[in-house]
Image: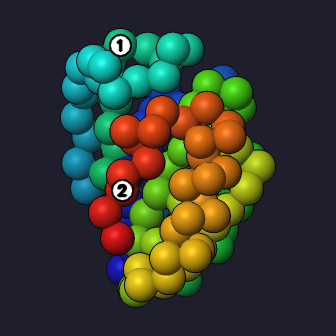
Amino acid sequence: MLTGRIIAESLATGSAIEIRGLRAVRISREDAGQSRAPHQPAAWTLLDVAAPDEAAEELASVLAGSLVANQGWYADFRVGQDHVVVVPGRVFRYTVTDQEGRRAAVDYGRRNGVPLHQLDWGD
């Protein structure tokens, strides 16, 4: 079972995520405070999601095409021993012990406006 979090405000206007078996397990609203990038809103709607492992590739692909570009957004989820990090137009999938794979995702995120303190996701 894959598990992850999507920030609703990170999705481009008009985008839709329709993945068989994807379900919201928790929806919450939080003050993003200082953790946000300059173009991001002060409050975020957090969608904690789960889906069968088989949905991982489709979810990653849909998110890569749905995230707002040039505003420091990303989404991530875990599937088995893999961590999947999605930024607009790009997907990184690496095992949680793969430091080189993690570094590639972090470096790409930094170059594309994700605040450094947001790139500390736990593997």
Residue 65 coordinates in the image, percent (x, y): 74, 47
Q: Judge left or right: residue 15 versus residue 78.
A: right
* Residue 27 location, quadrant: top left
Quadrant including the N terminus: bottom left
Q: In which quarter of the image is the C terminus?
A: bottom left
**Element class at badge 2:** loop
Using residue 53 as the reference point, say whether residue 108 is left or right of it: right
Q: Is residue 87 visible?
A: yes
Badge 2 is on which residue?
121
Percent position (x, y) of residue 86? 60, 55
Q: Work out how far the residue at label 1 is from the one at label 2, CA to CA, in angstroms.
A: 20 Å
Residues at circles 1 and 2 in contact by the CB criterion of under 8 Å: no
Q: Mark 1 points at which residue?
A: 42
**Which image quarter: residue 47?**
top left
- Identify which residue, 26 or 20, lies in the foreground: 26
Q: Is residue 59 above or below residue 64?
A: below
Q: Which mark is residue 84?
A: none
Front disc: 1 or 2 = 2
Residue at the spot 51% in from the left edge and 14% down from the top edge = 38
Amino acid type shown at disc 2: Trp
Residue drawn at 22 percent across, 34 percent down: 28
Residue 68 in the image: above or below residue 123: above
Q: Where is residue 112 in the image (x, y as percent from the top left)?
A: 67, 37
Sequence-first disc among 1 and 2: 1
Residue at 63%, 64% (x, y): give it.
Answer: 104
In the rendered image, the vertical position of residue 54 relative to residue 61, given as above or below: below
At which x and y percent is residue 97? 42, 84
The colour scheme of the drawn protein is rainbow
Residue at 31% x, 19% y is: 34
